[in-house]
Amino acid sequence: MFDFVRTHTRLLQFLLVLLVFPSFVFFGVQGYSRFTEGGNATVAEVDGHAITQAQWDAAHQQQAERLRQQMPGVDAKLLDSPQFKRETLDQLVRERVLMSAAEKQHLAVNDERLQRLFVTDPQYAFLRNPDNSINTQMLAAQGMSSAQFAERLRRDLTLRQVLAGITETAPAMPAAGKLALDALLQQRQVQLQRFNAADYAARVTPTDAELKAHYDANQARFKAPEQAVIEYVVLNAEALQQDVNVSEEDLRKYYDENAARYTSAEQRRASHILIASDKDQPAAERAKAKAKAEALLAELRKNPASFADVAKKESQDPGSAQKGGDLDFFARGAMVKPFEDAAFAMKPGEISNVVETDFGYHIIRLDAVRGGEKKPFEAVRGEIEAEVRKQLAQSRYTEAAEQFTNTVYEQPDSLQPVIDKLKLKKQTATVQRTPAPGAAGALASAKLLEAVFSNDVLRNKRNTEAVEIGANQLVSARVVEYRPERVRPFEEVQLQVRERVVAEQSLALARKDGQARLAQLKEGGDAAAASLPAPVTVSRAERGDLAPAALDAVMRADASKLPALLGVDVPQGFVVARLIKVEAPNAQSPALAALQGQYPQAWASAEGRAYYETLKKRFDVKIKAPAVAAVPAESAASEISR
C-alpha cells in the first residue's frame, strides 16, 4: 500500500486538495450522528465533543463515493489509503472547531442571505431550477428533504462566517508581496558536491560488540507490538445472492409491479413569458403585473406565431427571454407546482392562460413532449434479475443476521456452530489494536478490533458479539493466541540492528569527508574549487534534485561576498555548496505578474489557516487516532507558484 501511495503521490495530493475546506452541506459530523451507535471508540475530541470511529468511517465512505462520482477512473486504492482517510477525519475536526467558534461568537444567518447564497454559489448550480427554485428530485438523490437542505445550508454559511472575518479583511501589503515573490523567484547559481552515506556502506564493518551495544541502547525500537491471532467469520448479503433461485415468473411479476421504474420519465419542452412580481409585493403591484400579462396573452391569442418575439421583448426572466422564452425539456418536480401543473396539462403548440406563481405571472407555450415509453422486458431482464436476487438475499440476510447474532452469543466458546448453521467460511488473521495500513473488509474495522481486545474476549477466549462493519455485513471473531508487547530478542532482529548501525556509521563517514572537503575549499580558494562540478541554477520555486535542507541553506546564504561556501547536513549525508551568482527576478516576467495577482488570495488563505490553528488550540483539539505517514507536500513557495 505504501509503495502504491508513493508511486501516486501527485494524484493523492490532488484528491486531498478536493477535500480541503469543502462545503459542509453534504458532509459533516452532525450528518453521521444519526447513523452511528453510541459507545463507539473516540478518535478525536473538540471542545469536549467526541468524534467516533463510526462517524469517521461513515465520513470516509461518503467522501470516497463523492470523488468516485466526480472522477470515475480514480483508483480505489487511493481512496482507501490511510492518508486519504485521515483527511476526512481532519475535516470532521475542522467542522466541529468552526461550529464551536460560531456558537461562541453567536453567529447566525437570516433567510435573505440563505437565498442569496443558494442562487449565486456555483456549487449549488446542479440543484437550481431555471427559475432558481430548488430541484427536489436532485435533492432527493442527495438523501435530503428541502427542510434538511435549508438547515445544512444555513449551517454551512454560518461556518463560513467564522473564517470570513479573517480571510476577507486580511491586508496583503504590496511591499510584503514583493519581498515574498522576490524570494520565491530569485535564482542562484551554485556548485554542489554531495557525500552520500550509501556510498560509504561497503567501508563499514561493525563488530558484534557494536551491534549488541546499539541493540541494548535502543531496545524500544525493536519492540514487537501487542498482537492477537484470531479466527473470524463474515456474514454479508452480497454473498447470499449466489444461492438465491429466481424463477421467470418472479421476474415477470417484478416487471409488472414496477412498471413506472422501467418507463422513461415524461419530459416537456416549454417556452414562457414572465411578468415578474414577488409574492410579497403589495396587492396593487401584483394586480398591475397580472394585467400586463393578460394584455400580452390577448395579443398572443391573435398572433400565436409572435410568441418568441414577444418573449424577447417583454419577458422578465433573464435566463430565457433572449432565447424566445425557451426553457428546454424538464421533468416533473423541476418547476414550481402551478407552472408544472399547467405545462403537463397542455398539448404541444397550445398556449396557456396566465399562470400565477410566487415569481409572478407566466404565459406558457408547450413546444414538445418526449419520454413516457416503457422498456421491453427483454431489455431490462438482467437488471431485474439482479434486483430480485438482491431483494431476496436481503430478506434471507435479515433472518440469517438474527441467527448469526444469537448463535455467536449463545455459544460463545467457538465459531463452529455459526459456521455449520449458516455455511460460512472461517478465516484467520494476526491483528493489532488498530487497523493495519491497507487493511480491508473486517480487518479494517476499528470496532471489531476494539471488541477483539476487550477483556472478556481476550482473557476468556470467547466470541465477540456480532459486529456490524458495513451495510448488511456482520462479523464475529475469537482469539486463538494472544501475544503481548515484547522486546524482540537480539538474535531475531540482528539483521535490522546491523542495517541501522551501518547506516549510522556510513552517515558519520560521509559527513566527516564532507566537512574535510569544505575546509579544503575554504583554504584552497579558486584552485581547490576547480574540481567541483559545473554550476546549476536553483530557486525556491525550482529546486531540482537538491534536498530541501540544502536548498534552504543555499537560498539563505549571505550573498554580499561571492563566492560563498557552506556545508549542509542532509538525511542522505552531506552537501558542500559554492554559491557563485545571484539573479533577481525579471520585473517584466509574465510569471511574476501572474503571481502578484495571486498573492492577496494566498495571503488571505494563509491568514485563515493560521486563525484556524489558533481555534484548534482554543477548543482543545485532541486526535486519538494513530498518526499516518503524511503525503509528501510541496513547499509553501511552490504552492504560491502554482
Image (cartoon, rainbow, N blue to C red):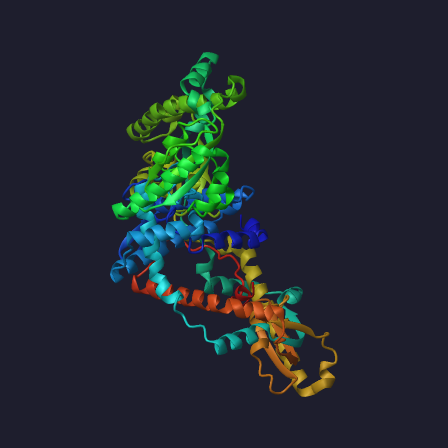
Nearer the observer, 20 or 123? 123
Residue 442, x across and y down, in percent: 42, 38
Image height check: is 449 above or below 514? above
Residue 53, x across and y down, in percent: 35, 46
Image height check: is 77 above or below 378? below
Nearer the observer, 642 or 545? 642
Name the quadrant of the C terminus: bottom right
Residue 41 appears anywhere in the view: no
Residue 175 appears anywhere in the view: yes
Image height check: is 209 above or below 484? below
Q: Is 4 left or right of 136, judged from the image as shown?
A: right
Image height check: is 411 above or below 481? above
Which of the 4 image quarters holds residue 578? bottom right
**What residue do we see at 48% from left, 13% from top?**
248
Residue 379, x across and y down, in percent: 54, 21
Residue 230, x across and y down, in percent: 41, 38
Q: Is 349 left or right of 516, judged from the image as shown?
A: left
